[in-house]
Image (cartoon, rainbow, N blue to C red):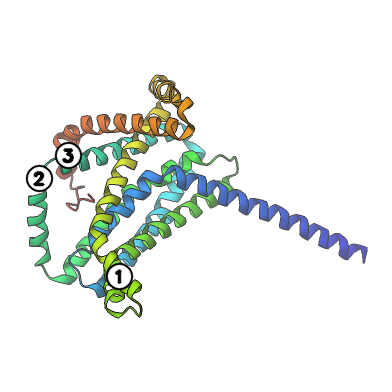
Amino acid sequence: MSGLLALLDDVAAIAKVAAASVDDVVAQATKAGTKAAGAVIDDAAVTPKYVHGFSAARELPIVWKIARGSIFNKLVILLPAALLLSAFAPWAIAPLLMLGGAYLCFEGAEKVAHWLSPAHDDVAEATAKKMSSEESAHLEETKVKGAIKTDFILSAEIMTIALAAIETDSFLLEAFALAVAGIGVTILVYGSVALIVKADDIGLHMAAEGRTHSGRALGRFIVAGMPTFLRTLTLVGTLAMLWVGGSIITHALAGMGWSGPEEVVHTIAHAFEALGGALEWLAGAVLHGVLGLAIGMALMPVVDRVLTPALRAVGLDGGESGH
């Protein structure tokens, strides 16, 4: 009997350790996912455009195809690469974070420039009309491939940011936390995208088939509000990219020995402390966002005139821009 009690006691102890490990994994994964918020919002804001122009019956299958590609990107390619990086080249994490931050700044600045250039909107609309006339299956395949390529870039940002946010010396905990963060982000992004792309259909159904007046009114509100919601999502995604991109770069520079930019932002933001913690945080976010916009604007001519032609010259430009 005493042996059985001892065995049960050991099992209980193992269970407690396992539960603590699960808690650690979830806590680290949540922290990592939060740090990657800018890229996550950008991913959710970008993806709905890939189903534009297709029939309602093809929208969810397309989202599912992209989601599967995203999981493959994160778990099969990027997770092992991130773990190898952490184990054998931890010094490279800060420079890679800066590259990811610079990419976010560039993407945010490019969106701002896009909004300030109505002529570019006309070109994009004409291109979309031309593409929509192509054979549907080929167009869908092209769109899905382009979306998965874009997702790879965004997933690389997310996994690099997540890797830097995870604080543990355990290889297994780090691996599981990265995997949980990657899967959780994918479910969050593409679950949200699925709801967004079907919101119009849901709203139309409610407006036409709703059993109550309030239900039908809610359906009409959803249909009428979706364009504004999508524009707001794009705006929030852009602001998040600039804020996160700027903060990543200042933090990475501080980690590499140049803490000047981060200290300046902290000092100015700290001046708002007397007005409340929320205003202090907002001041820091705005300063990082302005810095991110400046960095992105400076990078735009470099990317357009140097990097993009170089990629095309070696055949690495897929021709399907994610943004």
Q: Residue 217's mark?
A: 1
What's under tag 2, amino acid-wise? Pro
Q: In this picture, is 31 found above or below 295?
A: below
Based on the displayed image, in which of its 4 quarters is residue 225 positioned? bottom left
Q: Nearer the viewer, mark 2 or mark 1?
A: 1
Work out how far the residue at label 1 is from the one at label 3, CA to CA, in angstroms: 37 Å
The image shows residue 10 at horizontal and vertical percentages of 80, 57
Residue at the image position 41 percent from the left and 44 percent from the top: 36
Q: Label 2's element?
A: helix
**Residues at marks 2 and 1 touching, judged by CB atoms closer than 8 Å:** no
What's under tag 3, amino acid-wise? Ala
**Residues at marks 1 and 3 touching, judged by CB atoms closer than 8 Å:** no
Work out how far the residue at label 2 is from the one at label 1, CA to CA, in angstroms: 34 Å
Q: Nearer the viewer, mark 1 or mark 3?
A: 1
Q: Residues within 10 Å of mark 1 (few under 14, many from 20)?
A: some
What's under tag 1, amino acid-wise? Ala
Q: Earlier in the sequence, mark 1 or mark 3?
A: 3
Q: Label 3's element?
A: helix
Quadrant of the snapshot with the N terminus: bottom right
Q: Residues within 10 Å of mark 2 (few under 14, many from 20)?
A: few
Q: Residue 113's mark?
A: 3
**Residue 241 is at least partly visible in this image:** yes
Q: Residues within 10 Å of mark 3 (few under 14, many from 20)?
A: some
Q: Earlier in the sequence, mark 3 or mark 2?
A: 3
The answer to whether 189 appears left or right of 14 in the picture is: left
The image shows residue 188 at horizontal and vertical percentages of 42, 57
- Mark 2 sits on what residue? 118
